[in-house]
Image (cartoon, helix red, strand yellow):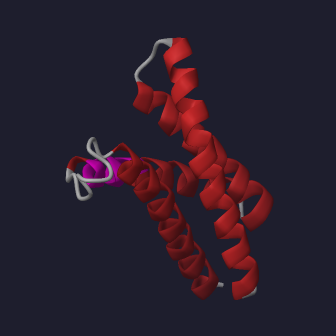
């Protein structure tokens, strides 16, 4: 896949993560469950859609990489949000965690893509 196409796809993935976060949080409030369960499942679904429609690898590799990336990215994003790096602009670290989640997901997808490409 050409770098320009990957950048375009990752940009779409970033915006999908950014816009879907508020919807997933609202859904979690309506379902009255823990918000990280809803976010994790939502990001897992986004990753599955991304992997099956864009990457088109084997189903097992798609599912495993989607689960791992969703869990790792959400965990690291929550840790970054707890650091309160931008207290003046983001007092609670929520926006920082949301952006970190999207960036970590894209970074992990690129790592998985590079590993998969080199093994072929």
Task: Name the image quarter holding the C terminus.
Answer: bottom right
| Residue at 51% in and 57% down | 102
* Magenta region includes residue 70: no
Q: Give the farthest residue toward the front.
A: 88
Q: Which percent across, then down, holds residue 95?
A: 40, 48
| Residue at 20% in and 53% down | 83
Query: Which of 60/88 is in front?
Result: 88
| Residue at 49% in and 49% down | 70
Q: Give the farthest residue toward the left.
A: 83
Does 56 sit left or right of 23 as displayed? right
Does 72 sit left or right of 41 as displayed? left
Q: Which percent across, then down, holds residue 29?
A: 50, 17
Residue 17 lies, with reference to residue 105, above or below; the image says above
- Which stretch appears magenta? 74-81
Give the prevailing secondary structure in the magenta stretch.
helix
Residue 59 lies, with reference to residue 31, above or below; the image says below
Q: How many labels sit on residues?
A: 0
């Amino acid at each position: 896949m050409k770098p320009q196409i990957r950048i375009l796809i990752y940009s779409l993935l970033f915006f999908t993560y950014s816009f879907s976060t508020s919807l997933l949080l609202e859904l979690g409030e309506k379902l009255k469950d823990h918000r990280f369960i809803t976010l994790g499942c939502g990001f897992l679904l986004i990753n599955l859609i991304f992997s099956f429609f864009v990457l088109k690898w084997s189903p097992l590799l798609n599912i495993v990489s989607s689960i791992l990336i969703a869990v790792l990215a959400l965990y690291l994003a929550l840790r970054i949000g707890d650091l309160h790096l931008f207290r003046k602009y983001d007092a609670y670290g929520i926006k920082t965690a949301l952006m970190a989640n999207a960036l970590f997901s894209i970074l992990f997808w690129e790592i998985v893509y590079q590993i998969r490409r080199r093994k072929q």
